Image (spheres, rainbow, N blue to C red):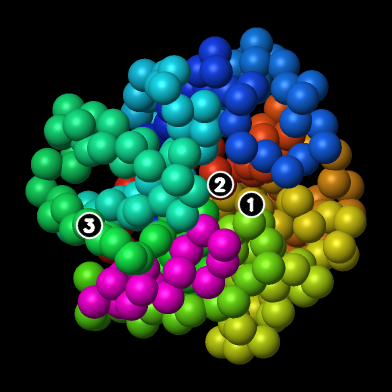
Amino acid sequence: MDRIFDVVLVRPPSNAYEHCISSNPEKNSIDVQLAKVQHQSYISILKENDITVLELLACEKYPDSVFMQDPALLGLGRSIIGRFGENSRRGEELTLMSELNRVQIMKNSRLLHVASPGTLEGGDIMVTDQQQLFVGLSSRTNSPGIIQLQTFLPDTKVTSVRTVSLHLLCGCSYLSDSTVIITPDVVSPQNFPSLKHITLDREDAYASDALYLGKHRVLIPSGFPNVSKKLKQAGYMPVEVDVSEFRKGDGGVTCLCSPIYKTI
């Protein structure tokens, strides 16, 4: 496989999901039951692409906990447990840690922890297959958190990227073959001089949060025909999934899983 992970953790939306943190004006129209159906469709697509999906239990205490990407950066060799920039989400990482003990595939992964005053959320971390990752300096991840990450990964080039979006991956995602899909109005392509760019218009920015499935297949939210066209022109096959209820919660397709990276 040409992807940098083969296993992901997911957590279904809880009944409290409608109370998640979101700036989306449609947040009050979240349909939790529809979100659960969409989440199952998302899982099905991952499995159809030979990705092993480890399903955790719903967590009623934390409405945002369906966004599994944020608590940690997981790897087969070592994992970094983050520290949320959003106070109301602090504690989710402790729930994840207790559950990791049950996941045997992680048994040899060394756990490292981001400490105060650092904050680090997984949505700000873009992992590549080149012993390099990029970290968004955002409202959720700060400089002390990035410095700690650099210390934890001394053999990996960690580059800080300033972003005005909620998370770095709201504006760009790594695919494969040194290629990133990116919305220049959200994140400057100049931050990635060594990578090829598939550039999106501002109105398609939501689809720049994309998940590479392997074999040149890319998971994107449904309803973005221009993005599908650009992916095909670049040699990729778009795979669409309806995540309308997660968009209302300020989440995208990468937010819904926590990959266990082979390169970390």
Give the CA separation, mark 1 to mark 2. Answer: 6 Å
Indicate the secondary structure of the residue bearing disc 2. Answer: loop
Relative side of 20 to 125, left or right: right
Q: Residue at x 36, y 36 (%)?
A: 92
Q: Quadrant of the C terminus?
A: bottom left
Relative side of 253 to 205, left or right: left
Residue underneath mark 3: 113
Main secondary structure type of the part rendered in magenta: helix
Q: Residue at x 61, y 88 (%)?
A: 193
Residue underneath mark 1: 210
Number of numbered discs: 3
Residue interval drawn in magenta: 137-151
Picture quadrant of residue 37? top right
Measured as percent of width and height from the top left, residue 26 is found at 82, 32
In terms of depth relative to the viewer, which is nearer, 129 or 50? 129
User: Does label 2 or label 3 sit earlier along the sequence?
Assistant: 3
The amino acid at mark 3 is: His
Measured as percent of width and height from the top left, residue 107 is found at 12, 41
Q: Is residue 21 above or below residue 133?
A: above
Q: Are marks 1 and 2 in contact (CB under 8 Å)?
A: yes
The residue carrying pointer 1 sits among few (fewer than 14), some (14 to 19) or many (20 or more) residues within 10 Å by Cα, namely many
The residue carrying pointer 2 sits among few (fewer than 14), some (14 to 19) or many (20 or more) residues within 10 Å by Cα, namely many
Relative side of 102 to 25, left or right: left
Q: Which mark is residue 254?
A: 2
The amino acid at mark 1 is: Ala
